[in-house]
Amino acid sequence: MRHLLLFALLLLPLGCSDTVDDDDDATTPAFGDDDDATTPAPDDDDSGDDDDATAPDPCAEKPPVCEGICALSEPVCDPVTGWECTSPGMESPETSCDGFDNDCDGEVDEDGVCPDCTFDTTALSGALYAAWDIDFDFDCNTYFTSLVSGPDWAKVVPEDPLEPTETYYGNANQNMGWGLVDPDPNNRRMVVTYSCCEGCGCQAQNGLTLLYTCEPTDPGCGCAGETNCPGFLDAPFIPSPLEDLTATINGRALTSPNGLAVGPRNSYYVGNFRSSQCTDAATCIPCGPDQPGVFCSTDGENCCEESAVGRLVNFTLPDAAGVSTWRTDAIYPGEEILGLATGRDGSVLVGTHQGNLYRWDPIAVSSTLLQTFTGPVFTITQERPTGDWYVGVQADPQIVRLSEAGTELPLPATVPANPAGEGVLQWGPDGQLWRLQGEVSANATLDVYPL
């Protein structure tokens, strides 16, 4: 009888519970099962290790090459999900129509976030008298600004040729020069430089001003309370002193400030700029390259600068209280900034009268020399879908095409290397390259090159 009981006990399954599977099969994941496909656990198969295999570290893999506005930020790695491209203001999916790759997928304003624009050259030709600069918004309107006062103006030509062109006059005789449209058409505004020469006798102060095309009854319209609304502000929101440059375009001497560019997240840039709203008091606040992240403001005590030449200034538009801020991001000693443009990744290309072309990286806070030409670099624009740059140089050839990284590329057959005169280049939301040869008291010449 004892032998029968012993035999029966030997037939019983070993173990204390039928709810734990630790025999390395794939049936019941459980504590003690250190199979490769399950959570790391203590050794239960006499392998000598707590785990037969360790899960791979995703951060040990090579980081990705990030695109769009993420290209200027270092990728980050999560120990579980791995590497990720990210940037302040990143969108997923893309929702803003602003000329930037905000979702970092290598495409700009995709999936129908922008309207399809076409421009009527006949309607545009009627607005070319004394036009000096050209820009577009992403609502398919074209903007021209004049240079010489008497009177100064900006014109807005709608896409529909049956709609009238609107002309907005400045509040005093003043040389304007350069205009930059807010990429968000809902804001209905354009930044304009007041750039009068020292001996021109202009009646308004130099600096940065705004043209608003909204009505004072529109919510958030920035010109409400100004003398003209819609129209220009009564005075520059950041004033600057008179300071001439040595460079010329089409034989016309330039003066500061000169050049405008807009980046993502409402970041704006101007060349050869210093504020006249400053003090030499010992308590003044400096906001230059040696004070990273420090901004001066129109309601603060700001240190004066000796010269505007070579200063790349980052500025903000007035807030609800009318306060604007600025700081000098970079200084190019002895070089006059002529051409400015932002890339679809948020970097800034800077062209100077010495023929140098720089790339300013606002995230790394560094400047890189991309190219040196034999003449001044006075205009820059980027073809947004491809990232290719088109650069205007006072040399032969006059128009140069560069890759997004800055290497020289052949021009398309549709773009002449040496057109007549010196013209401002502007990529349009219709996908074409526009060139305006500005005039002071005659009709400007407007050419368009398919890309």
Image (cartoon, helix red, strand yellow):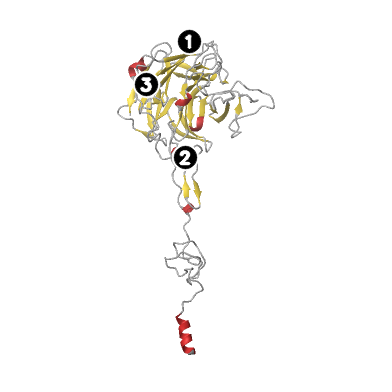
Which numbered disc flags the more N-terminal residue, 1 or 2? 2
Q: Does residue 74 lie above or below 412 as drawn? A: below
Quarter assignment of residue 126 = top left
Estimate the spatial distance between the alpha carbons at disc 3 and disc 2, rounded to whole Å. 33 Å
**Residue at far front of view:** 1
**Disc 3 or 2, which lies upstream in sequence?**
2
Q: Is residue 233 visible?
A: yes
Which residue is tagged 3? 159
Give the label on residue 70, or none.
Answer: 2
Say above or below: 397 vs 95. Answer: above
Mark 1 surroundings within 10 Å by alpha-carbon count, few (fewer than 14), some (14 through 19), many (20 or more): some
Determine whether the residue tagged by mark 3 lies in a helix, strand or loop: loop
Quarter location, residue 203: top right
Secondary structure category for the residue under label 2: helix
Write the residue at 48% across / 53% down: 60
Residue ranking furthest to the left: 413
- Identify the residue under disc 1: 151
Q: Alpha-carbon neighbours of circle 3 within 10 Å: few (<14), some, or many (≥20)?
A: many
Query: Residue 265 versus residue 245: which sits nearer the camera?
Result: 265
Q: Nearer the viewer, mark 3 or mark 1?
A: 3
Residue furthest bottom in the image: 1
Above-or-below relation of 19 to 233: below
Q: Amino acid at mark 1?
A: Pro
Q: Residue at x 51, y 73 (%)?
A: 16
Q: Nearer the viewer, residue 223 or 300?
A: 223
Query: Relative to 294, does residue 421 appear above or below in the rendering?
Result: above
CB atoms of marks 3 and 1 within 8 Å: no
Nearest the eye: 222 or 82: 222
Is residue 419 among what the camera can see?
no
Of the two numbered discs 3 and 2 in the rendering, the one whose residue sits closer to the viewer: 3
- The amino acid type found where label 3 is placed reads Glu
Looking at the picture, which amino acid does disc 2 mark?
Cys
